[in-house]
Image (tube, rainbow, N blue to C red):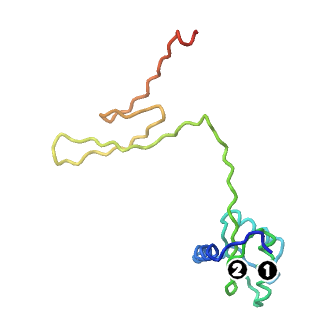
Amino acid sequence: MPSITLTPAQRKVHRAEAHHLDPVVHIGNDGLTPAVRKEADAALKAHGLIKIRVLNDDRSARETMLAELADALDAAPIQHIGKLLVLWRPLPEKARAADEDRKPGPREVKVLKFGKRPGQKPEVKVVKVLGNQRITPGGKLKRAKVRKTSIKKNAG
């Protein structure tokens, strides 16, 4: 029995998502080998929802393969249609290092410079603005001023 149980509505949503997918794992005449299990596990970690193509003609063997894969990989069996099996497992959370000292990166800003004649197209310039810079109303880049702190406040 797989550890993940889905409602029919959830299964329907996953079937719809899997419709356009191509099979990423192929099971040959050797059946479920450790290499096939390893590839299916890697595909589930990367995609979450995968299709598996089985080259075996026996329907009952394909059903047992689907059940075995679902149990071994802690996945939910979504669909078995023809020679295609569909498995789903929620994607693992990606661990991100929280960098509290990180400041915003550079951003690109479009600056419009209007001509003196009316009806003339404005000149568009893309400018890269760093974290310590700002754009003046005239379209020029200026660095942010360093704010001075009081000597008296720091001494006391």
Quarter holding the N terminus is bottom right
Residue bearing the label numbered 1: 65
The residue positioned farthest toward the bottom in the image shown: 58
Q: Is residue 12 above or below residue 145?
A: below
Q: Is residue 118 above or below residue 49?
A: above
Q: Quadrant of residue 92?
A: bottom right
* Label 2 secondary element: strand
Locate residue 128 relative to residue 153 in the image: left or right: left
Measuring from the top left, give residue 24's x and y in whole percent: 68, 73
Q: Quadrant of residue 101?
A: top right
Distance (Cα) linking label 1 and label 2: 9 Å
Measuring from the top left, give residue 100's x and y in whole percent: 62, 36
Q: Is residue 148 above or below residue 53?
A: above
Residue bearing the label numbered 2: 85
Q: Name which residue lies at 47% across and 21% down.
A: 147
Q: Is residue 132 above or below residue 29?
A: above
